[in-house]
Image: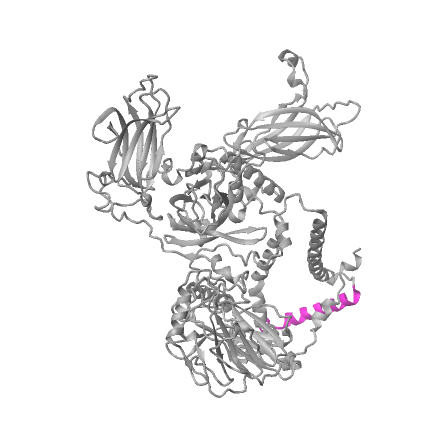
Amino acid sequence: MPKDGEGSSSPFVEVDFGNQRIRTQTIYKNLNPSWNEKLFFNLDDPNILEHNSIEVCIYNERRQFPGRNFLGKVRIHGSNVVKKGEEALQRFQLEKKWFFSYVKGEIGLKIFLSPEIEPKSSPSNTSPISNTSTDATTTSTKTETTADNPSISDSTPVSSVDDKPATVQEPAPPALAPDEIADTSNTEEDYTTSEASEVKELKESDSFEVHEEVKIKTTQHVQRHQFYHQPRVSVEKRPQAVPVVTMHQINPQSPQYPHHPNNHQEDFKLKDTSPVLGERWPNGGTRGGGGISWFTGDKVTSTYDLVEQMHYLYARIVKAKDLPTNAINGSCDPYAEVKLGNYKGTTRHFEKKSNPEWNQVFAFSKDRIQSSMLEVIIKEKEMVGRDDYLGKVVFDLNEIPTRVPPDSPLAPQWYRLEDRRGEGKVRGEVMLAVWMGTQADEAFPEAWHADAASVHGEGIFNIRSKVYVSPKLWYLRVNVIEAQDVQPNDRTRAPEVLVKGQVGNQILRTKVCPIRTANPLWNEDLVFVAAEPFEEHLTLTIEDRVHPGKEEVLGKITLPLSLFEKRLDHRPVHSRWFNLEKFGFGILEGDKRKELKFSSRVHLRACLEGAYHVLDESTMYISDQRPTARQLWKNPIGILEVGILSAQGLLPMKAKDGRGTTDAYCVAKYGQKWVRTRTIIDSFSPKWNEQYTWEVYDPCTVITLGVFDNCHLGTHEKPNSTNPVKDSRIGKVRIRLSTLETYRIYTHSYPLLVLHPNGVKKMGELQLAVRFTCLSLANMIYIYGHPLLPKMHYIHPFTVNQIDSLRYQAMSIVAARLARAEPPLRKEVVEYMLDVDSHMWSMRRSKANFFRIMSVFSGLFSVTRWIDEVCHWKNPITTVLVHLLFLILICYPELILPTVFLYMFLIGIWNYRFRPKHPPHMDTKLSWAETLHPDELDEEFDTFPTSRPHDIVRMRYDRLRSVAGRIQTVVGDMATQGERVQLLVSWRDPRATSLFVVFCLGAAIVLYVTPFRVLGLIAGLYVLRHPRFRSKMPSVPSNFFKRLPARTDSML
């Protein structure tokens, strides 16, 4: 927790055990320190551990003036200390010192008994700097302290061996202070210039191949009476205490621990970035050009303020006329070639056309411009040999005008063609326009880009940026009421009738009518998902269940969805009768169909529900809550703007020409609007710099962004393949809008974390700029008091099974419709963005959710522990203050609720200083993605139904039964306690009930004649009584309650 007034702390740990107090070294300016120090304590008799405790306190060392601030403490009972070899890293939540103290964070400790006489160091850990002997040590208690350090960067000079990742709210880059590096001799500590320069060189080195380790040992002696410790003062005569030995490993990438989580925790963090957003053109020309040089001139304004401006040279080839024909065949097959240095783009060619029209745009990035001349060459396509040269137009880049929207598009002009040497004009003219612009230009999405020159054919359409809109989804509710005159094929038996409805791939059935009759009654709802435009039809069939494995069709009807009424509220719609077509007569001629005088009919009440929101994504990550009908939409309350800047450090996703490559694009989804950036070819650090905007109707929504590798560039695809190529997922980021401050621009680099069968893996980083603008603060506050979903979800709610089924059908429809766009947003992309498999069982998710529940109740547990400490007078001052507060509240009970709310108000105001500075991101510790067993990972990636061998499935089933057995035991214990309360007055145990009834009578009389304040005072003083008046045995009410009967005796 920050304590130095600058948003950071300089913490050290002080451990107190058996009149011995030893402290660690101070880590300066670090909210997530890692000490990795071993503290040794003298212990004459291990049996006395059960009657002692170890107190670990964390303090902030003040440097401006002597002193320290309390950051938290942990008290470990001696009975929890294990022998050497049985120790494990334990994380303890930091506790308060006083009731009104504010403490947060946790500390990781290893505590064990060591029979060693002296802490031995391995040969690799010996340091020639310090030569300290400890030859008078008895049996020791060995405590290894590591603070909660979620990330160690490549330049971090301290390496923690036993640390594990954790969530950080205010990460600070760890720095190596000069006070942390000390050479301990017999007289004093020296910090030499050579050592400082050596450490500096190691810190500034970015090489991952350095395997040398520089370790500096510091020995400090701290006695009980020493209240403050001066880290640069060494004691010449060593006292009786055992020394503190600190090992600092300068090289954090040591191969000694290549797979330890700490080596990768820094990569899992959210990082602050400082991009130059809304950058003005550094050397731009004036609008319209007019002979002003592109490289020198006045600056122009920008329309994109959340991205870094990228400058492009655009060339629009519109058409040509009067081109010369071939002397041999008398025709012309022209095409245009745009050339800038080594980059060359061509238009499509036309056959036998002297006046072609291309209207194609070519874009060349300013960063890759290799020439000062742009050539537009017109050629004729030849079947054999080289293409014929018809003419060219040359532009000097210094004379090209500049255009930035909202300027009107530059008007194309006619240019006469020149010969090869540019010395004369030739026959033919070409209409084109050339200008300098940015990615904000309207021509940018459809332009041919020089960095994608290797893509040909259909792959060109798959790399363009696009905006998609999800189809408008409706719930189709079909209330099957009854049917009349149903005739079975076998007239000798009464039919068992059911109705089956189908819309597209969705098939639903009613229950079998319980009464065998020709006029069955169901009154059941069948709910489907339909999308505009309505391409499918509703098909209803009445079937007779002949036996459990066979059903015969008795009648059928097909209805267009446009036939049904659109309902915008809960009022019922009118029902209608529909005649059924006798199954089998549909293939007869029209005259024979008319001969059928009798037909069954079905009674339906069907409508399209417009007051529901069709869920196509999980409610936990919902991005849109509006109902289907546009008439029910409210005004937007804000604007969300997202600048998709770039990605860094992407991993190779496929092989090309014997090397790894990645063709990355980003997809963002919020509400009904999907956006897809253009694909950057063959780059591990692609830069998109594209900005998009969404209207926000509810702040409690989530925007999802995913990065994918494009595998449909035309070079790796195999048409008509049984296993089509799929775009590979690289990672995903979610941002909840309610966690953003309005009008603030958030620029962060988000880690792209993906869970693979071999564990969690960082695939790269996605750099974003996000801004949430509020249009109406009153409307936003008004939204917070309204339901999350439209009111129809609460007036006529769906069942849990219906919600899951309808959500899956909606996702399938959205994926199918977006896959038909050009370029398509493919099914695997849509499913990943919508979390199609979030409902599947996972041992990892079960553990994560369990510990989330425990974290929720941790505050209640802390309060319970604090009350227990107060009741047992662990801190007499606190207990006396609680007594005084209790007496005040007893005398003035009307102050209880104001005091509670005032306390919550003060807590909220106090915590405002420590509010999160950045949006939340993927947390590997919270997700339990770091300490997973390989079999649990394999189970999570298993298909449904399973495809694993029988022995593995049997083992997993047994494991699941074991976990379920523990849950069953807990649920049974809860049921037992509830049944005891219920059976308290049921005379199941006549003696217990008699005692309880008599007690209730006496309590009623006492409560009637005694004022409530007196009873409250007596009860409070009894609870807060001194431990001298307490017994270690359970109380009488507890004993009485545990003796009550339960219904467990009646269970088989």
Task: Judge whether residue 94 can be spotted in this image.
Answer: no
The residue drawn where x is 69% and y is 52% is 956
Q: How is the image coloured?
A: one colour
The residue drawn where x is 63% and y is 50% is 938
The residue drawn where x is 70% and y is 25% is 553
* 688 vs 519, nearest the viewer: 688
Q: Position of residue 994 (x, y in %)?
A: 77, 67
Q: Position of residue 561 (x, y in %)?
A: 55, 28
Residue 788 among magenta residues: no
Residue 996 among magenta residues: yes
* Prevalent SS, magenta region: helix
Left or right of 482? Residue 317 is left
In the image, which residues are magenta? 989-1014
The residue drawn where x is 63% and y is 84% is 44
| Image quadrant in which you'd find residue 1033 | bottom right
Q: Quadrant of the C terminus?
A: bottom right
* 208 vs 990, nearest the viewer: 208
Left or right of 930? Residue 425 is left
Q: Residue furthest top?
A: 591
| Image quadrant in which you'd find residue 389 | top left
